[in-house]
Image (cartoon, helix red, strand yellow):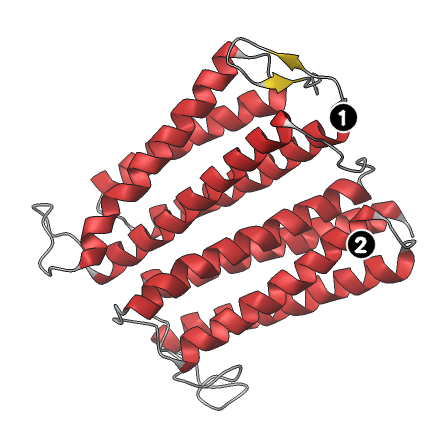
Amino acid sequence: MDPVVVKRFAQLVLGWNVVTILLGALVRATHSGAGCGRSWPTCSGEILPELAGARAVEYVHRVASGIALVLVLGLAVLVWRRTARGEPIRRAAAWAGLAIIGEALIGAAIVFYEWVDADSSIARVVAVPLHLVNTFLLLAALTLVVWYAAGGQRLHGRGPVRRWLALGAWGLVAIAATGAVTALADTLFPKDSSGSVGAIHFLSDLRVVHPLLATTVVASAVIASRRARTPLLWRLLTLVMLGQLVLGVANIWLGTPVWLQLLHLLVADVIWVLYVWFAAQVLSSIHASSVEDDVGLRHTIPEHR
């Protein structure tokens, strides 16, 4: 297997899936989810329907999703055919394949059950964050495929460091899930010029969870950066997360314009990919013996430049 070819292909697949995620957010933000009716994977029963308005937006997203499915499965087949048994890149590629199938199934359920447009059912409130969590699994798996194809070593960290990294990952996933719920609330129950919401719905009350959780996690990252010896990538990641907080405030202040929602989601995806890469760096280079620092975190993290 030519690792350069696999790495470039994996990078392409990763980038394409980020674009597809943004298109999915555009569908939600523009109330275009019902553009193709209950038909899936066709659009209103047609492969090439007449495109206009919501149908055009939904159709473009479906085409992008279909291409993403083919690319991810193609990458998984390529990796499995060209690598030896037991190689960790195989496991990452397999997870990516399972995740993209999960994306398709969740998307199909959303269409068939009509959890789109103005629907504010409990089922949709569950499906939307579930969809995003599965998306994060897909991005993580693809990032690890790129990691291994680029010559990254097997991940073998154990003990407190791994637990802290897992805690950070769960924190980011929780932020993403609550962010999806907040975005849904902003779409279904937008605030007026005075900042009040006309309709009374439990989704509106859940808006506050996302910013509180995001602020807590970012504050923890900043404290860790200041009190522990951290590599360059972590400091970069912390800066990006601080910038994301600023974007979140601007999103609320400006009334959640679609373009800013998409930018906010894009930065969230970038943060997640960077975090997975950072975790891979740490877990591939950590030693069995670790050193406890003044915040109680036992670790040996090399300085990556």
State the residue position of label 1: 285
Q: CA distance from mark 2 to mark 1?
A: 20 Å
In the rendered structure, the answer to whether residue 282 lies left or right of residue 216 reads: right
Q: Residue at x 70, y 31 (%)?
A: 158
Q: Residue 31: in sight, yes or no?
A: no
Q: State whether residue 12 is above or below residue 112.
A: above
Few, some or many residues within 10 Å of mark 2 (<14, 14–19, 20+): many
> Residue 162 appears at what percent x and percent y?
63, 32
Sequence-earlier tag: 2 or 1: 2
In the rendered structure, the answer to whether residue 134 lies left or right of residue 117 reads: right
Secondary structure of the residue carrying tag 1 is helix
As rendered, which of 267 and 202 lies closer to the eye?
A: 202
Q: State whether residue 34 is above or below residue 260.
A: below
As rendered, which of 43 and 289 lies closer to the eye?
A: 289
State the residue position of label 2: 90
In the rendered structure, the answer to whether residue 100 lies left or right of residue 133 reads: right
- Give the quarter of the figure containing the C terminus: top right
Q: Residue at x 58, y 52 (%)?
A: 137
